[in-house]
Image: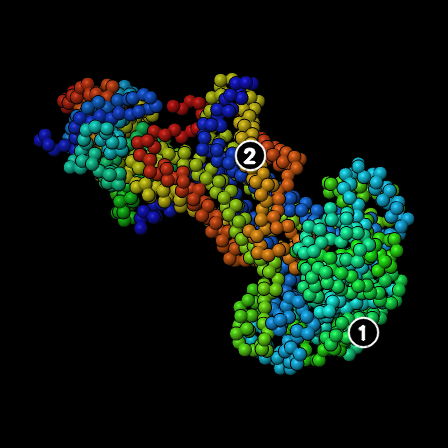
Amino acid sequence: MPENEYVVKLESVSRVYHQGDQTVHALDHISLRIHHGEMVVVAGPSGSGKTTLLNIAGGLDRPTEGKVWLKEHELTTMNRRALAQLRLHAISFVFQAYNLIPVLSAEENAEFILLLRGVPAAARRAKVREVLNAVGLQGLEDRRPHQLSGGQQQRVAVARAIVAEPALVLADEPTANLDSASAAALLELMVRLNRELGTTFLFSTHDPRVMRRARRVIRMMDGRIESDENIPEDEQE
Amino acid sequence: MGILLTIAWRNIWRHTRRTLLTVFTVALGLMLLLLSIGLGDGGHYQMIESSVRFGSGHVVIQAPGYQQSRGVAKYVDYGAQHRALAWLDSAGDRFGVQTVLRRVFGSGLAASAEDSAGVQMIGIQPALERSVSRFAEKLTAGKFPESDDAEEVVIGSGVARRLALKPGDKLVLTAQEVGGRELQSILVRVGGIMRTGIEEVDESTVLLPLVTAQRFLGTGEGVHQIAVLLRDSRLAEPLARLARERLPGLDVLTWAQALPELNDFIRIDDAGNYLFNTVFFVLIAFLVLNTLLMSVLERKREFALLDALGLTPERRFSMIMLEAGFVALLSAAAGAALGLLGHLYFAVHGLPIDWFYTGEISAAGVAFDPVIYSNLSEKRILGCIGLVFVLTLLLALVPARRAARPADACLLGRA
Amino acid sequence: MSALWIALRLGWRNLWRNPRRSLITLAAIAAAYAFLIGMIGLMEGLKNQLLRNGTRLQLGDFQIHESTYLPDRNINDTIGADEGVDLQAVLARISTQPEVEGLSARVYGFGLLSTGSFSSGAQLLGVDPAAELFVTTLLRGLRPGSSLPAGGARGLILGQALAEEIHARPGAEVAVVTQSADGTLGNDLFHVVGILRTGLSYQDRSLAVTHRSDLQELLALAPGRVHEVAGRIRDPLRADRVCALLNGSGLLPPHTKAQSWGELSPQLRDYVKLSESTNGLMIFLVALFAAFGVLNTTMMAVFERTREIGMLGSLGMRPALILLTILLESLFLGLLGLAGGFGIGALIMSYLATHGWDLSRWVGEVSMLGTRMDPILKGAWSWGQVGWAAGGLIAATLLAAFLPARRVAWMQPVAALAAPTEG
């Protein structure tokens, strides 16, 4: 794959927080590239900076030093409005929990991004129904989040991510709150999407099961990258 | 218990903004209450003091039936006067009697070279009245007569204008004397001109020295009114009650009975004030209850935790009550401070009426003083603060009981 | 526009996430509005009553005098000076002003009344009873057994307190002594035909009403000489306007001036103006307290939803849109509260407008500001004030929601996402 065809590029990115009289170096001069279609996992213990890395890659947070690109957009020079636009059109987040708008049904949640983009109702409906079926939620379209299980809620979040057709999906410990069966199912879904649609995924996790499904594992510790390995296909499960 | 106090105190500062907002709302309500009562009471006392000095006294002793129909023949004769004055002398100290004034009333015509006008004549004791009543301080020209039998009068500014009179000018007073069918006239000199601000008084009042008036109207030694001025108007009622027992055969009235209109006005004004404040407090109570309840409802997990740690329902109840108590204390303190500051300002500088009204205003036959001074007794202040405090604590009972409920253990399990 | 639609839908549904909280806040707004409607109604009713009593009892909506007559009320300063005027013609001319509904020509004097052993001074008022009834309600306060004085009959109507003072009852003979216009002492025997009670203490103690022609005769005034023409117009609040029109129209006799009740009784006018500002102050205070309540609620709601708001930001929803959603939620709350409050308020008002608030058990009539307050307060509706109250409450609600919402909507999503949702 050509070196310059990346989806995400970080160049010497650092992120420093000040909490009271303490200074926290969440990220310490990180450089990396993520290419189109990759399924990357960022692993490490809590406090290693995984979440911060994802937030910066997605434009939710700004680095104290360094530059960030999403394709040709240099995030570090964009203002808040532009970043929001970018998130709307090119980036999807899946969090550990609280992904959904509580007052909207599953279907309405899934179509929300299209709604924000101004896509007309007929086009939205068709697309969303199709995707909800694909993730196995047919029949549950009208349920509100509190009427769905944890696994089902996460699937709605993924459905929303797919419907948006983003360049990048950032998932921050998406399986952490789920039991093993749901976690496995969710993971399976995301792997399938990566293969079938070629969507680029960047995960953070400390769940070994998730790490086993990834093709590239970046290990972090104390804000620095310890290792960055591609796992050949035949070694994956 | 000590630890509960500490926890309760720190708890209310966890949401600084919310606590401050609640404290501020209640404090504002208390401040408004204190200001409105202070200015209301102050205004009313001023009206009372004004009118008792003009026309009745805090307690007034009259011949039976005089209040209803004021015939000049209904006077209190010498013997009865003597009895009354003697008794007042003895009972005086107990009730803080300041002065006892005797007055005679009549009506007739006043004529000068220029014109004539109908007048109400009041026979007064100049020396006494000068020191206590309002007439003297409203003089705009000339002076008060010197003695009880001088042939000098003080006329209202409206009378002076209509009859084109200045101090020193002569005028003729005509009236019908007691029992006679003939009209009597006397020639008197204008000693002074007064301006009270009450149109009815200024347009038609003539003050005569008492003895001169008695001779003119033919009441002999009799007077129509013995007006008692007290240092504290609140003692009027007890004095009047005792006087009725000790002075049978005479009508004894408090200012409220002698001036029912003024009394009514004050009562209506007070009622309006109370109504307003009550509804206000209901609103505030609503809001405070809302806040307290919601803050308890959102701490369900915390209470479950405390329950698991061993804090009994009674203790949880006490904790909330203590929190409410602190909020009440802070609110009461802030409200009292603000209210008292405002009260002090208005007690010293007063509230000028001309912020609202362009000229002079009157109600119930009394002119408002141009500046109203705030007047708050300790009883009132403590009453208001106590009310707010108790109200807040009462409201806290509902959420406190909520907190004491057996907790939902399943709330503890989640991450 | 889809953004607005999103905000409307989310805003409305968010309202019902915590029904109890929303209902309590809604109830508070409703209570505040209902209270304001009631108070405004009472204040308006009181104002109307004072105005009506002030003008309709004796003053009239406007008065016309010879320019030198006030304030001394010299008996010789009649309209048209010493010659007087053709009364019929003058009244007819003034009536051509379309807003004038009634006119009464009056004569004033002062006299000493005596019934033998008792006497008192009195203000003498001479009117044409038929005309006077069109202008004021003065002669409607007659006690049972009274009748109106007819011209030439020398009938006298006395104020109640005055009658009691000189011990006069209907039928009694009263000697009236006065100084006439020509300088002589006028002296005549009248008889009492009625007793009057206005409720204005000054009038009841000193007013004696007779037929104009009888008083003119007593005062040695020609029939064409009157001191005052009092008038009534359709809408008392237009009195200043009408007087300006009259004064500039040439319909008035020369050297005369028309003055409105506001000019003649500045106290009353000031009160009318004051009661509007008082209402404004009251609306402000109530809205302020309502705002505090809404602020509290919104602060709590926003606090709970901070993480969710961060999530919305992560989806790409713009802060302005998030803010709009929260504002619309509050707007719905406010509008629902107003609707409820209006319903309750309307009920209260319909009771107050028909039955009024009866204070007569505790207080009697009170004269103040040159007019009289009756112990039964009826409410009166004022759309203007009620509208202001609604506006004030909505503004308060929106402002109270704006402050906490603004802070959170513009937070960096990353900070919002990390926020705790339980206190």
Tell whether C376 sits left or right of C423. right
Residue C333 spot, x, y in % from top left: 46, 45
Residue displayed at 65% across by 35% down = B378
Which residue sits furthest right?
Answer: B79
User: Height in image: B123 above or below C212?
Assistant: above
Q: Secondary structure at mark 1?
A: strand
Q: Pointers 2 and 1 in contact (CB under 8 A)?
A: no
Task: Have a look at marks 2 and 1 and say if they share a chain.
Answer: no
Q: Where residue B100 is drawn, which disc sits there?
A: none
Q: Secondary structure at mark 2?
A: helix
Q: Nearer the viewer, mark 2 or mark 1?
A: 1
* Quadrant of the drawing holding the C terminus of chain B: top left
Residue under label 2 = B337
Residue displayed at 65% across by 49% down = B269
Residue displayed at 68% across by 54% down = B139
> Is residue C331 at all visible to an observer of this figure?
yes
* Quadrant of the drawing holding the N terminus of chain B: top right
The type of residue carrying mark 1 is Asn
Residue C72 spot, x, y in % from top left: 66, 67
User: Height in image: B79 above or below C380?
Assistant: above
The type of residue carrying mark 2 is Ala
C100 or B11, nearer to the observer = C100
The CA distance from mark 2 to mark 1 is: 68 Å
